[in-house]
Amino acid sequence: MSLDILLDAMEQGIANDLSVEDLAGAGFVSRTQLYREFYNATGHSVKEYVRKRRLSRALALIKHTDMPLLEIAQECGFGSQQALCKGVKAATGLSPLQYKAGGDEYYFPVSTGQRARTVAVSTEAIPPTRRLLYYDSRLRGIENRALAWLFAEMPGYSGRIYGRNGQQKGSKLCYELFVESDHPDQPEITGTFAKTACPNIEDEINAAWDYLYDDWLRTSMFSMSVEQPWGEQPYFEEYICANGQVRGLKLYLPVQKRPGFHRIRLCRCGDMHFLVARRSGRDAEEAASRAVMGFLATRHPSLAQTARQFYVSTAETEQGLHLVQAQGYACGVVLQAPLSLPPGCEVEMLTHPAGEYAVLEGDCCGDSGAYQAVLGAWTQGMGLSALGAPFAVYEADGGFDTQNIRVKIYSQVKNGTNGQDRG
């Protein structure tokens, strides 16, 4: 199926009565294949995707034009003005006039059209397991060495095997294995998971996880579940084995349904101050966060105790004469005013200047890059240009449980047509 052609046909025909037969013809597939492959690629049914794209376009016209509601309804494929008003109310809780006067934008992005792999979403029960910890000084290939150790310790084992990265111990890296056992220490888990399969090749595994997080999740009808299995780690892998050999992997990402529309606001912000540390490599976020909190605990304990807003951005590393994107992060805390720092300390003050920012609000997400991609698409669609890289601020005012944490993605913007700030 030519998904790019199909998505283009949907966008071009959004005002028309898009029949499944016409769409199947545009994609050169049967109706059954259309349903299956479109869902696998976008995480949406055809009907749900068209509904959200129609409403997203209508909301943009309501907010940024003076077109009459009837004309917007006709241009965006609604049967009547009443149907448009009902859709706006259901998605935003506001009437069209209230939505136009408010400061929030609700947005559903166009699918990327990438069909890197099949993703299935279903409810599944993971049996009770026993957790085993494997430590090694080398990162690459640690999974296979952990499995070899398991089969050496438990020759003839034929049950299910799950794995994920564990907590580093000193200089040793950790990989956790979960196996079926007569004496389990981990309970059965029942939940809704997005799943995809891949071969047991490290680069293929990384590419599969990147696809789940960065491509599929951000435009699907799902978000990461706030109730994470097996603690705070939001994922795990199952090894498909035969005769002690790994034949492939199945990746599990816990998900939950979401309304589907992202809330975005354009607002003027003053100077924003952050105390950060920069780290690269494995567990970079955790290491950077520890450095900041350790500094505050020693020199400013009251700030360490009251910190409820935390900064995260990708870090740039200078190599030679060039700035390149590294596998690293700048992490820290939000401050009301800059701190005076002693020379040579491992933390620094970072200030994002006053200006107009596009701000996307969302639930706690293990990979804020999924939200950054959505905000970037919206910014481009609104004719704005981003000034610098986006960054995330996690807010834990209601406590540090996952369900109480919210994230805001900030991107400083200017009008893309004349290069001037909008404010």
Image: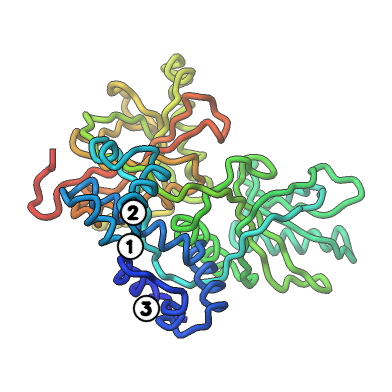
Q: Which of marks 1 and 3 is nearer the N terminus?
A: 3
Please name the residue shown 80% across and 59% down the image.
150
Looking at the rendered structure, the kind of residue marked 3 is Ile
Q: Position of residue 384 (x, y in %)?
A: 19, 51
Say what secondary structure mark 2 lies in. helix
Marks 1 and 3 close (CB-CB < 8 Å) = no
Q: Name the residue under label 1.
A: 77
Taking 342 as reference, is 125 left or right? right
Q: Where is residue 82 in the image (x, y as percent from the top left)?
A: 34, 49
Say what secondary structure mark 1 lies in. loop
Crowding at dot 2, Cα within 10 Å, few <14 / some 14-19 / many 20+, comes out as many
Please name the residue shown 16% across and 47% down the image.
414
Say what secondary structure mark 3 lies in. helix
Cα–Cα span, label 3 and label 2: 20 Å
Taking 29 as reference, is 178 left or right? right
Crowding at dot 3, Cα within 10 Å, few <14 / some 14-19 / many 20+, comes out as some
Q: Is residue 288 above or below residue 133?
A: above
- Colouring mode (rainbow / by chain / secondary structure / one colour): rainbow
Q: In this view, does 297 lie above or below 9?
A: above
Crowding at dot 1, Cα within 10 Å, few <14 / some 14-19 / many 20+, comes out as many
Cα–Cα span, label 2 and label 1: 12 Å
Please name the residue shown 84% across and 54% down the image.
180
Cα–Cα span, label 1 and label 3: 20 Å
Identify the image quadrant of residue 380: bottom left
Looking at the rendered structure, the kind of residue marked 2 is Ser
Q: Name the residue under label 3.
A: 5
The tag on residue 56 is: 2
| Residue 147 visible in rendering | yes
Looking at the rendered structure, the kind of residue marked 1 is Gly
Viewer-proximal residue, 154 or 264?
264
Please name the residue shown 19% across and 52% down the image.
385
